[in-house]
Structures are given as structure tokens and as C-alpha cells.
Image: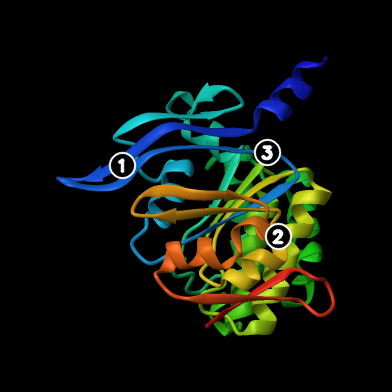
């Protein structure tokens, strides 16, 4: 068996008994999780359950209190910043301002890990940016200022930057929280399709259980800093699990077209 096949079976990213505390407050209890290429994993759970903390740890925006996070079998803290940025792309819950910047300029920032601050922007870099703009349907907005775009268009611009970064893993923290339902569906469908087209691993925090079940291959349910359930959407979106997770009686109906579970407050 080829080494690449072994890595793929073992998981691209792995959390091994990872904890995180802020001062004396424990945010994450020992968490173990692996992420595989070609799959989109959704993280759900109530507010304060540790979802954002977990994805920030995976993106190395924070350091775990204990435990180990591995990428391709290597501890995450053993990667240099540029080397890691070539492997993992991260979209925070609140994206930083991009005042005075065009869409193309923002997307081009995704190439920084490959050419560096003093490096020349190569033909390959330009091609990667053009491909990212085209795939996110932003080519016609390339010269528009980011601040002039709608919320959904801005989120796609940030996703395009992640695509130009040409990584193996996408980490997104609540990318649909400020979007209307149509833009939510567009964003999640695009991320799902990209995981398949590019053989990426995607980890995405979502609040909408039905959207998570519709687009994700796997769901991870967090409560009180612990993983309380993990599996295919149909195994997570069921009354007992959802009531235990949210403390609320919930019912389930099959989607009339797909048969996927749809939750509602009972």
C-alpha cells in the first residue's frame, strides 16, 4: 500500500485527547477526532459548548492545554507558519476588515504562503487566483471593493482566498451565521462540492442542525466541551440525541425529496 493511501486511511488531521482551558475555566475536555480527505464534517452544539475553541485549535489560532493535534502524522506545533498555511486554510467567525481592498487583491492574499512577502507573484499564482475566482463565481466582481459586496458575496470572496491558498484542509467557523437561507445553501453546497473535487478535508461549525444534516457527510456534536455524539447525519439528527444536546424536545420528519432527517421543536 502506498504511503499516501496509509495517510488517507489514518486521517489527514487528528486530535488526540486535546484539552483547552482559559485560566481556571475548562473549555474543552479531552477530545479525540480525525478528519479525512473528501469529507465535510460539521460541528454542532449549543452556545458555549467549545465549538469555536476546537476549530481554532485545529487552525493553530490557539494552543491546546494538553493533548496533541497531528497533520499527516506530524504534531501541528512542528510546522512553520508558512508551511502550515500551505496545508490548512481558516475562515474565522468574524472576518477582519478589508477596507480599500478589491476582491482580486483579497483572493491574492491566499498565495502569500507560497511566494512570501518579498517573492514575485508568479504566473502560477495568477492562475490559482483566477481559478478560485471562477470557481466561486466572483470573476465579474474581481475589481469591486470588498466593502461594496453583499454578505454572501463577501463570504464567497473569503472562501475564494482559501481556495487560492491551495491547502488540503478547510476550517470554517460559522461561515453562514450572517447569511440568508439562499446564501447559506450556496455556501455550504460549494464547500461540500470542493471537498469532493479537490479531495479536501473540511471542518465547519454550524448552528442550523438541518443545514448541517443536509450538506455534511458527518456530524460531531459538542456539549460542555465534550463530544457527545458523532456519526452520519441520520444517526445524530434524531429526537433523543438532539434533546440531550440542546435540552429541548425535538421531533424529526423525513425530507420529502431526499428522505434526510429534518428536525423541529416539538
Mark 1 residue crowding within 10 angstroms, few (<14) / some (14–19) / many (20+): many
- Which residue is the site of mark 2? 191
Relative horizontal placement of residue 191, taking residue 101 as reference (left or right): right
- Asked whether residue 40 is in view, the answer is yes
Quadrant of the rendered structure where residue 18 is?
A: top left
Question: Which residue lies at the image location 47% right of the left edge and 74% below the top edge?
Answer: 99
Point out residue 8 in the picture as x, y percentages from the top left corner: 72, 29
Q: How many marks?
A: 3
Front-lying residue, 182 or 33 = 33
Q: Is mark 1 on a helix, strand or loop?
A: strand
- Which residue is the site of mark 1? 20
Point out residue 134 in the picture as x, y percentages from the top left corner: 81, 65
The Cα–Cα distance between marks 2 and 1, rounded to whole angstroms, is 28 Å
Q: Which of marks 1 and 3 is nearer the N terminus?
A: 1
Relative horizontal placement of residue 74, taking residue 108 as reference (left or right): left
Front-lying residue, 160 or 238 = 238
In the displayed structure, 157 sits above or below 7; it is below
Point out residue 70 in the picture as x, y percentages from the top left corner: 52, 28
Mark 3 residue crowding within 10 angstroms, few (<14) / some (14–19) / many (20+): many
Quadrant of the rendered structure where residue 172 is?
A: bottom right
Q: Are marks 1 and 3 in contact (CB under 8 Å)?
A: no
Tell me the number on the disc at residue 152: none
- Which residue is the site of mark 3? 36
- Asked whether residue 94 is in view, the answer is no
Question: Which residue lies at the image location 49% right of the left edge and 69% below the top edge?
Answer: 98
The Cα–Cα distance between marks 3 and 2, rounded to whole angstroms, is 15 Å
Q: What element carries label 3?
A: loop
Q: Which of marks 3 and 2 is nearer the N terminus?
A: 3
Question: Which residue lies at the image location 52% right of the left edge and 42% below the top edge?
Answer: 117
Amino acid at each position: 500500500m502506498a504511503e499516501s493511501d496509509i495517510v488517507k486511511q489514518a486521517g489527514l488531521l487528528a486530535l488526540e485527547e486535546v484539552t483547552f482551558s482559559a485560566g481556571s475555566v475548562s473549555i474543552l475536555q479531552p477530545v479525540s477526532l480525525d478528519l479525512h480527505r473528501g469529507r465535510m464534517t460539521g460541528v454542532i452544539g449549543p452556545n458555549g459548548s467549545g465549538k469555536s475553541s476546537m476549530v481554532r485549535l485545529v487552525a493553530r489560532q490557539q494552543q491546546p492545554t494538553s493533548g496533541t493535534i497531528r497533520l499527516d502524522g506530524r504534531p501541528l506545533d512542528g510546522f512553520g507558519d508558512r508551511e502550515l498555511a500551505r496545508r490548512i486554510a481558516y475562515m474565522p467567525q468574524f472576518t477582519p476588515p478589508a477596507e480599500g481592498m478589491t476582491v482580486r487583491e483579497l483572493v491574492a492574499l491566499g498565495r502569500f504562503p507560497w511566494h512570501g512577502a518579498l517573492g514575485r507573484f508568479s504566473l502560477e499564482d495568477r492562475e490559482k487566483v483566477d481559478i478560485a475566482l471562477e470557481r466561486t463565481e466572483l470573476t465579474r466582481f474581481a475589481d469591486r471593493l470588498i466593502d461594496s459586496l453583499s454578505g454572501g458575496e463577501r463570504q464567497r470572496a473569503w472562501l475564494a482566498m482559501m481556495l487560492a491558498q491551495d491547502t488540503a484542509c478547510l476550517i470554517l467557523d460559522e461561515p453562514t451565521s450572517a447569511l440568508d437561507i439562499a446564501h447559506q445553501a450556496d455556501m455550504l453546497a460549494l464547500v461540500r462540492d470542493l471537498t469532493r473535487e479537490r479531495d479536501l478535508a473540511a471542518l465547519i461549525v454550524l448552528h442550523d442542525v438541518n443545514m448541517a444534516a443536509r450538506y455534511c457527510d458527518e456530524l460531531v456534536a459538542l456539549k460542555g466541551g465534550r463530544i457527545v455524539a458523532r456519526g452520519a447525519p441520520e444517526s445524530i439528527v434524531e429526537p433523543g440525541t438532539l434533546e440531550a444536546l440542546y435540552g429541548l424536545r425535538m421531533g424529526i420528519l423525513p425530507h420529502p425529496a431526499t428522505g434526510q432527517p429534518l428536525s423541529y421543536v416539538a
